């Protein structure tokens, strides 16, 4: 018997029997692609011609000065087409879908970035596309839903459970068990059953490979610390993987601290001690669950980090202490975002702003000749409604009220 | 390699001496509440059901369709716990003289502790378990514990399962094999056809355990179709749907139409 995809005790493939041949097929296609240098060549060409890769690193000159400690750099995944790192994984899985001869892709989405990226990939490759999104998230992230639908994807609002990312994943699996013959499930993060955690991390490793070279070229040194936000963990796995062999580089994963410690208040699986080991959504990891093993509600200002589980690879790296996990609260995150916008003219997504918040807290205590690197995993255009609410911007409110009045009168402004 | 003998398999075989097709039904414990669960079991047994799956509710029932999904989340919303499920199951097995199985997802076993879970099944008279998200490769502890207690780990055949895999699953099972009539989740329609017959013949040839067939079995016609092709017809979502539409009292007449 074969037990694949374990990272110490985490990972595995806890899948319904109906999907066993589908996972065998996927794993074979993935391993063949990995062994075929022309696949990665094709991938790099696609990413450089379609999605602005290599994305640059930017030094935060003003904030480095203001905070008075380490020099702060960020990796500009926000400059990808569709505005986030999600496209790295999606385009890779798109190429795999073509190799497997499938004609339809499905995906779950939380913040909507992965849904938009998948809809984009489907439009480009000519696949049919269905996106599952928690009804709660559909309400939070209408702009992304709009673009997915414009690109021809069908967006299904999931009204089960907590109506967030985990419920969207369950629904996507329910679709897949019916339609696996022509459909690939482009899972969006480094979670789920084997080979997804490994495969998604492989596609995202493009971030870390580029970033390591860029830091060396730019500063002559490796960064002392590297920060990434952690929902499912794909952008963190992507950036960290460039530095796994560099023991002197400290890797810091920043989870959603929400309203602080306590069940239901946050989505921090590793930084806080509210999560325990369990098996759900096809893999074993730390979950925010009760003693019976029922998943609990989570909270975060950012839809993309609002998830009960975490990459099994990151749970492993948490236990081996290779990655340090911290949590940033909603308030700190919104403040860090505003600070970045105001001082640097950069607009990090609320998800990415978790990494910025932690870096800003630590940078002042570091020496001036140290460099740190933050993964700016996405940009915040999609968050405009949430952010405007969080900072209670009166002009925005006025604009929405006027706009609504216009629609009510049937006037298309 | 062959499966070990279980009380479940021998009671199925004994019942088959008297009937050409047995009927298994499925309920979600605690839905709509635990008292109704017991009442429904009573009605089902009186109506002639031969064995039953008792589902311990789980928050992420990945393999279940809308009807059972809703039953799971409603049961949890009403406060159903694993402990209560065990207590009610114990009452059920004591009061009714047919075999009962647990159906649930692996996290419920994992969080209880696999050995403790299986030992408790044995203590309260549960004869087997169906854990749809636990393939044998991930479930050695579970398989060992079930074997130690001579309980039946029931695995699932699907239309996508190649024959060597069917034999492997059969080797790791006891009691019976649960064969799903089509792809997809529970509770959607199945077109029972020549293709289904062929598939069931393949299932039959791949195991010497009794064969149960479920997913989309909802009428007397469906049940009759399975006669001679399987040992057990499984009616899952449809009984729950009937219960929702007609109340608990609707269940018994519905079952009676199936076995008429």
Image: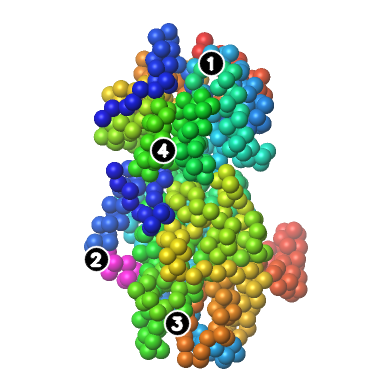
Q: Assign the N terminus of chain B to one quadrant of the image.
A: top left
Q: Please name which of the two marks, 2 or 3, marks the residue nearer to the observer.
A: 3
Does the stretch in magenta take in A402? no
Q: Same chain, marks 4 and 3?
A: no
The chosen color scheme is rainbow
CA distance separating discs 4 and 2:
43 Å
B243 left or right of A239? Answer: right
- Mark 1–mark 2 contact, CB under 8 Å? no
Which mark is in front, 4 or 2? Answer: 4
What residue sits 34% from the left and 36% below the top? B160
Label of residue A38 in the image? 2
Which numbered mark, 1 or 2, is in the foreground of this view? 1
Chain letter for the residue marked with disc 2 in the picture = A
Q: Which residue appears at 56% of the width and 56% of the height?
A: A275
Q: CA distance from mark 4 to mark 3?
A: 45 Å
Q: Residues within 10 Å of mark 4 (few under 14, many from 20)?
A: many
Q: Is residue A150 left or right of residue A185?
A: right
Q: Which residue is mark 4?
A: B142
Crowdedness of circle 1 by 10 Å Cα count: few (<14), some, many (20+)?
few
In the rendered image, the vertical position of residue A101 relative to residue A254, given as above or below: above
Which percent across, then down, holds residue B101? 49, 27
Q: Which residues are magenta?
A: A38-48
């Amino acid at each position: 018997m074969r037990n694949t995809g374990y990272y110490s005790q985490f990972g595995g493939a806890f899948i319904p029997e109906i999907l066993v041949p589908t996972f065998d097929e996927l794993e074979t296609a993935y391993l063949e692609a990995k062994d075929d240098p022309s696949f990665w060549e094709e991938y790099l060409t696609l990413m450089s011609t379609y999605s602005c890769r290599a994305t640059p690193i930017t030094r935060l000159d003003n904030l480095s000065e203001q905070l008075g400690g380490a020099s702060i750099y960020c990796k500009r995944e926000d400059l990808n087409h569709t505005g986030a790192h999600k496209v790295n994984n999606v385009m890779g899985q798109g190429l795999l879908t073509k190799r497997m001869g499938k004609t339809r892709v499905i995906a779950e989405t939380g913040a909507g970035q992965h849904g938009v990226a998948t809809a984009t990939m489907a439009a480009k490759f000519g696949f049919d596309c269905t996106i599952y999104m928690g009804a709660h998230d559909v309400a939070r992230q209408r702009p992304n839903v709009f673009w997915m639908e414009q690109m021809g994807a069908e967006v299904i609002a999931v009204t089960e459970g907590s109506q967030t990312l985990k419920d969207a994943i369950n629904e996507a699996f329910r679709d897949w068990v019916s339609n696996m013959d022509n459909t690939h499930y482009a899972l969006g993060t480094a979670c789920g059953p084997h080979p997804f955690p490994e495969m998604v991390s492989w596609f995202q490793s493009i971030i870390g490979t580029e970033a390591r070279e860029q830091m060396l070229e730019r500063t002559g040194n490796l960064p002392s610390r590297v920060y990434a936000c952690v929902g499912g963990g794909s952008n963190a796995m992507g950036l960290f993987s460039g530095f796994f062999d560099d023991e002197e580089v400290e890797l810091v994963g920043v989870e959603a601290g929400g309203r602080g410690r306590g069940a239901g208040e946050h989505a921090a699986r590793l930084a806080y001690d509210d999560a325990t080991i369990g098996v759900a959504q096809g893999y074993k990891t730390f979950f925010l669950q009760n003693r019976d093993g029922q998943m609990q509600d989570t909270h975060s200002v950012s839809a993309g980090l609002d998830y009960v589980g975490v990459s099994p690879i990151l749970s492993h790296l948490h236990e081996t202490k290779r990655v340090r996990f911290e949590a940033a609260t909603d308030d700190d995150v919104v403040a860090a975002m505003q600070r970045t916008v105001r001082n640097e003219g950069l607009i990090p997504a609320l998800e990415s702003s978790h990494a910025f918040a932690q870096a800003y807290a630590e940078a002042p205590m570091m020496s001036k000749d140290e460099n740190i690197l933050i993964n700016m995993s996405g940009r915040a255009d999609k968050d405009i409604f949430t952010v405007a609410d969080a900072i209670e911007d009166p002009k925005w409110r006025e604009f929405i009220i006027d706009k609504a009045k216009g629609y009510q009168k049937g006037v298309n402004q | 390699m062959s499966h070990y003998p279980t009380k479940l398999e021998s009671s199925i075989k004994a019942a088959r001496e008297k009937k050409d097709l047995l009927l298994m039904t499925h309920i979600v414990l605690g839905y709509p509440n635990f008292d109704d669960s017991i009442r429904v079991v009573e009605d089902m047994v009186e109506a002639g059901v031969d064995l039953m799956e008792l589902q311990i509710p789980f928050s992420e029932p990945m393999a279940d369709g809308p009807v059972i999904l809703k039953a799971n989340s409603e049961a949890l919303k009403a406060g159903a716990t694993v402990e209560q499920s065990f207590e009610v199951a114990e009452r059920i097995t004591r009061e009714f003289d047919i075999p009962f199985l647990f159906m649930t997802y692996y996290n419920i076993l994992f969080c209880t502790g696999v050995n403790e879970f299986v030992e408790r099944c044995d203590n309260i008279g549960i004869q087997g378990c169906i854990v749809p998200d636990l393939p044998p490769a991930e479930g050695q502890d579970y398989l060992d514990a079930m074997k130690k207690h001579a309980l039946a780990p029931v695995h699932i055949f699907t239309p996508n399962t190649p024959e060597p895999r069917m034999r492997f699953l059969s080797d790791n099972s006891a009691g019976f094999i649960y064969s799903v009539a089509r792809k997809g989740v529970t509770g959607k329609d199945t077109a029972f056809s020549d293709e289904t017959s062929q598939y069931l013949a393949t299932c039959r040839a791949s195991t010497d355990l009794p064969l149960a067939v479920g997913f989309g079995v909802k009428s007397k016609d469906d049940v009759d179709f399975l006669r001679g092709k399987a040992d057990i017809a499984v009616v899952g979502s449809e009984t729950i749907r009937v219960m929702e539409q007609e109340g608990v009292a609707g269940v018994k007449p519905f079952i009676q139409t199936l076995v008429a």
